[in-house]
Amino acid sequence: MLNSLKGLGVTLKTMLRKPVTAQYPKEHLPVNRRYMGFPALTWDFQVQEPYCVGCMVCIRNCPTQCMTATLKDNPLHKEGKSTRRKIVDIFEVNLGRCILCEICVEVCNFDAIVMSHEHELSKYERNGNRVDLQALLEMGKQYQEDTGWEPEQAAAPKEGVQA
Amino acid sequence: MSGDLTTTRPLDTLELMINMGPQHPSTHGVFRMVVWVDGERIVNMEPYIGYLHRGSEKLSEGELYNQVITLFDRLDYVSNFNNELTFCMAIEKLMGVQVPERAQYIRVIMCELNRIASHLLFYGTFGLDVGAMTPIMYGFRDRERIQSIFEAVSGARLMHNYFRVGGLRQDVPSDFRERMERLLPQLEQGVEECDQLLSYNEVFLARTRSIGVLTKEEAIAYGASGPVLRASGVPEDVRVSEPYSVYDRFDFNVPVGKKGDCWDRYYVRVEEMRESLKIIRQVLAQLPDGPIMAAGVRRIIRPPRGEVYVRTENPRGDFGVFLVSDGTDKPYRVKIRPPSFLNLQAMQAMMRNAYVADVVVILGSVDIVLGEVDR
């Protein structure tokens, strides 16, 4: 009997403390700086183009094959504004397949892909989680704005990127 | 005369077969068992597994070594760091890579925190199994704190993918030590509260004492490991008997039960949480500076031809990985020795002659994770 009362004492003590729960849809807890949300593509604000050159190393290393990409000749390179000879043309990620493992970020040579803080996935459309280049860049810009992200290797990408 | 209720003829009784699961809320996942009962007594129990089979072992053969780590995260989905560690250690042993000190220490911190988180989950769900609603609130309160540390360190709350062959993906954040200093007293207090709340409650004792007894001999014969084995009185812990990583540098006890009943299995885990906290304190005090990645490990890992077996102490027991490499960038064979799978078999012995009402309690006390059983 005494031990049951002891247990009751714990609950009584807890009653006087502040609640630790957060009412989720109304209240969002802040995510940590390193939080790995869905992958997003970063935007080079100096040249006004994505960092991604479409080299597809992330696609080859993805455990779930959730991404596809193609590349094209960079028009800005012809004009002499950019050092990137090739640039990403189509980039599509099926976020429903993504397992948030950060392998794509690790293998990227151009700091072109980041794990954004985006994590809410519910969509009304069946295919609503297939995001294209435009949406990925928007997510990336948001992430860069929120966290003040800077590329690790600030140097320009190497000339003559292999396709 | 038929239909005469006053007859003294003994009534015919039949064994009754009861199906439980696979979609039963108290089977801790998709697990099915068939129980034969004679009145209130259990005559026999047969587990049926395989509802969560994802073919992790076969899938591993088609993935690069770094990608296989993500599969190991999903084996025992409440002790991910321990699984990752085992697989990384297997490759490191095969390649002869020396992991830097700092990485080893951080690995130990993460694994021990993961052990506490796993046992807190057990604490909460075991409370639910015996019919107590409150413990899960306390267990999850502290588990949440641990997971927020995990999020700060690895970026994910559950599927971390943080350990790498030869070290870690990235160093811990700069405020890690402060956060740990804040977390540890909270956890210590939390574990004490959990203990006071449930352990010696009279109703709880009545539901768990002398229920589902697994003797020492039976536990060894069934190949049980971890808390299930230690509760039966065998002081076997891979961290002590075959120290891996840097576990031999820390001072901790191996809690052992006396009878091997449900209460012992529960209390061994509560004690283990205290021991884990003790280890973390020591690791934090000794945490050296330095690199977190071994030199000379390339992005695409190609271990030499050969085979290796590594075992570690997972929160559920002795977790082993048998790895065969043919020298390419993908494993030739990965065999996983899951502790839950073997503990599950010992359940048959625990359930014999128990009451039907105790089925859920016994199942809960073994603390299986189906992701690991079915792989």
Image (cartoon, helix red, strand yellow):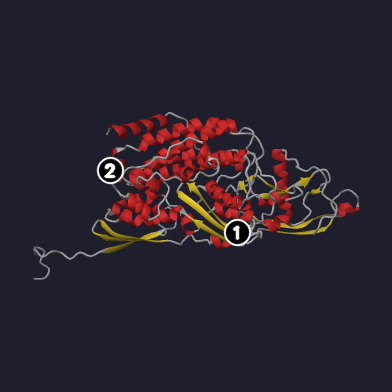
User: Under tag 1, what secondary structure?
Assistant: strand
Q: Which numbered mark, 2 or 1, is in the foreground of this view?
A: 1
Disc 2, disc 1: CB below 8 Å? no
Residue B294 vertical placement versus A96 (above, below): above
Look at the image and tell me in which quarter the N terminus of chain B lies: bottom left
Image mark 2: chain: B
Image mark 1: chain: B
Give the residue at mark 1. B306
The residue closer to the viewer here, A11 or B250, is B250
Quick one: label 1, few (<14), some, or many (20+) residues within 10 Å? few
Residue B57 vertical placement versus B118 (above, below): below
Picture quadrant of residue B155: top right
Picture quadrant of residue A123: bottom right
Question: Which numbered circle lies on residue A145?
Answer: none
**Image location (x, y in percent) of residue B35:** 32, 60
Quick one: label 2, few (<14), some, or many (20+) residues within 10 Å? few
**Image location (x, y in percent) of residue B164:** 62, 48
Residue A97 vertical placement versus B284 (above, below): below
- Residue furthest to the bottom in view is B1
Residue B194 vertical placement versus B10 (above, below): above
Q: Is residue B138 visible?
A: yes
User: Under tag 2, what secondary structure?
Assistant: helix
Give the residue at mark 2. B206
Q: Is residue A26 visible?
A: no
Apparent side of residue B356 relative to residue A76 in the rendered image (left or right)? left
The residue closer to the viewer here, A127 or A106, is A106
Q: Residue at x 67, y 39 (%)?
A: B291
**Image location (x, y in percent) of residue A25:** 55, 43
User: Which is more N-terminal, label 1 or label 2?
Assistant: 2
The residue closer to the viewer here, B169 or B38, is B169
The amino acid sitting under disc 2 is: Ala
The amino acid sitting under disc 1 is: Gly
